[in-house]
Amino acid sequence: MLELYEGALDVPEILKRWYEEEAKSNYGAFIPFVGTVRAENGIEGLSFDIYEPILTNWFDAWQAEAKKRGALLKMAHSKGDVLLHQSSYIAAVFSPKRRVALETIEEFVEDFKASAPIWKYDLKNGERIYAKERSTAIKGSGILS
Amino acid sequence: MLELYEGALDVPEILKRWYEEEAKSNYGAFIPFVGTVRAENGIEGLSFDIYEPILTNWFDAWQAEAKKRGALLKMAHSKGDVLLHQSSYIAAVFSPKRRVALETIEEFVEDFKASAPIWKYDLKNGERIYAKERSTAIKGSGILS
Amino acid sequence: MVTVEFLGPIGKEPIQLDITNLLELSQKLKEDESLKEWLECSAVAINDKIVASKDHPLQDGDKISLLPPVCGG
Amino acid sequence: MVTVEFLGPIGKEPIQLDITNLLELSQKLKEDESLKEWLECSAVAINDKIVASKDHPLQDGDKISLLPPVCGG
């Protein structure tokens, strides 16, 4: 339920497939969050590095938490370059209940931003520049300093 | 941006169209909420009445509020019968910012449940039974009693 | 004359009344026993705007709507 | 021997070290001036599990990863 792609996501295809996969699962609420690359600061796009083993562990722990709530999570993310107005991220929750779905998508997306081992680079003038000032140190950082 | 349909929604078509309509609008976050009819209480489906003039006023007021936040709303809802595992409701927010998108979709969906002039009926044994115990009195109700 | 509409599950045909405010409307509708439960839980709109109080004048041609408890989605 | 990986933007090749705990790792890595800024802001994983404290023994064959600040999405 964690899908990684080289380059931009095909958002309509992914949303259609996920919706149809769970069409008979009796979930009453489905909330995807779609992240798209904005034109800002003169960038040509973004680029992503992913460390898959820890991303998979992080996602599996969240899936177990969602299951306790009666919910199900799906996620897709891009590796490498994603150009302006293309999408790099979809997180989605399915749940029998509206409240659980709304709360879970918010917590999941916020924890994703704070914890998922993904590094973002601006593509600018043909260079790949680490987006340091927009990045968040993972909880527990600095123990070696 | 408010779409009403006879019967069930074609969710993949609507999500694809909305996503593509705003593909160049430079929104960084897109969050649709999709509501699907669950099999429960032995129902065969749900049915909806809508009073369109007040629904349109309610939606337009929300659109103006979203615009103040730099966001955009779209909504689709079914009229008449929607069978088990079919979808009757999509609310969606587009926003440059993740936080605004998450907060707006939650407030919009909750206010929709409390205020939008839509009446729900269970379809059971061929009858159409008003879902009174699941319904919410609109704020200010009872002034004639 | 004003027109009164009963929305959704109330299931009553529209009526026309010769009244000038919502207090009179309340008195008229209370005469219909079948409406009692609906009056307690319904909101009221005048010309498609929901109003918060019974102290509201009515004008000739106004459309009044009774909105029982809602459940979209 | 343990292997130390430097993830994302740190941009340094993996190294192998003959150490038995994270305190020793900290001392070794501080010798590399180019790592100073990264040590302050990076999390540490042992065999792909993030650890919260430096008081952690290491075993032969362990894989240690340094994770600098993240920004997915």
Image: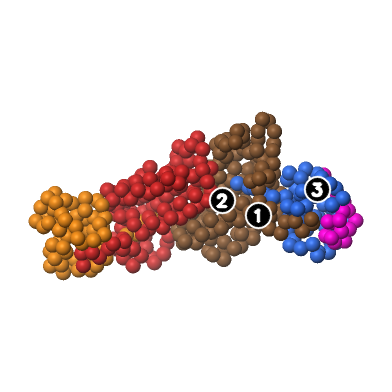
Chain colours: A brown, B red, C orange, D blue
- What's the amino acid at mark 3? Leu
Q: Nearer the viewer, residue C58 or A30?
A: C58
Per the image, label 2 sits on a secondary structure element best described as: strand
Q: Secondary structure at mark 1?
A: helix
Residue hosting label 3: D35
Q: Amino acid at mark 1?
A: Ser
Of A81 and B15, the residue lying toward us: A81
Q: Is residue C13 above or below residue B142?
A: above
Identify the magenta region.
D13-28
Compared across the picture, whether A30 is left or right of B41 comes to: right
- Assign a secondary structure to mark 3: helix
Q: Which residue is mark 1?
A: A115
The answer to which quarter of the image holds residue C69 is bottom left
Q: Circle 1 marks a residue in which chain?
A: A
Q: Nearer the viewer, mark 3 or mark 2?
A: 3
Quadrant placement of the N terminus of chain B:
top left
Label 3 Cα neighbours within 10 Å, binned few <14 / some 14-19 / many ≥20? some
